[in-house]
Amino acid sequence: MKENKSIDEISSLKDYAYYIIMSIGKAMLKAKIFVQLKASVLDPQGKAVTNSLHNLGYNDVSETRISKYIEITFSSDNPQEVGTKVEQICSNLLANPNTESYHYKIEVME
């Protein structure tokens, strides 16, 4: 969306949300979080998918690992603060530290 659009020219909900965010001067941040089993942990769900792929004729598939992808939107515009919160959320709720690892990136929402 061009920054010089007036409120009368906005045609979509996404453009409207962007207009509101830009008018108050505060960007929102989104954390994109990937949680996966550690390499040493067996993945029975992934093994089942691999077997199904073989049954469908995809015999060149050697392994499938199942992971989780989570997006969390924050009203904060402070990446350090959001990063700290994401670390806490991942270690306390989203990932089991015994069997899973995680990584994430924080992006400014458009």
Image: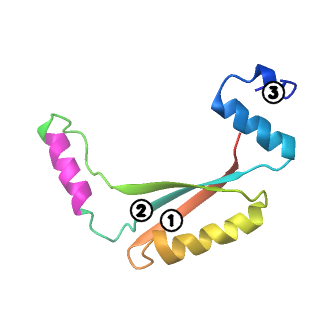
Q: Are discs 3 and 1 less than 8 Å apart at CB?
A: no
Vertical order, 105 against 96 (above or below):
above
**Mark 3 lies on residue:** 7
Point out the residue furthest to the front here.
8
* Residue at the (70%, 53%) spot, across then down: 29
Identify the secondary structure beneath mark 2.
strand
Q: Which mark sits nearer the N-terminus, 3 or 1?
A: 3
Which mark, by number, is residue 102? 1
- Proximity of marks 1 and 2: CB atoms separated by less than 8 Å: yes
Q: Real-space Cα distance between discs 1 and 2? A: 6 Å
Look at the image and give the residue range highlighted in magenta: 44-54
Q: Please state, as top left, top right, bottom left or bottom right, where the N terminus lies in the image.
A: top right
How many numbered dots are placed on residues in this image?
3
Of labels 1 and 2, earlier in sequence is 2
Residue 51 % position (x, y): 16, 48
Residue 12 position within the rendered picture, expressed as x and y whole percent measured from the top left: 65, 26
Residue appearing at x 68%, y 71% in the figure: 84
Q: Nearer the viewer, mark 3 or mark 2?
A: 3
Tell me the kind of residue under disc 2. Gln
Comparing 18 with 96, the one in front is 18
Task: Give how far across and how far down residue 86 sits, in percent.
Answer: 61, 67
Q: Is residue 45 magenta?
A: yes
Of labels 3 and 2, earlier in sequence is 3
Q: Amino acid at mark 1?
A: Tyr
Where's residue 65, x and y in %? 33, 55
**Residue picked out by circle 2:** 36
Distance of label 3 from label 1 (alpha carbons): 41 Å
Label 2 CA crowd tier, 10 Å (few <14, some 14–19, many 20+): some
Q: Quadrant of residue 58?
A: top left
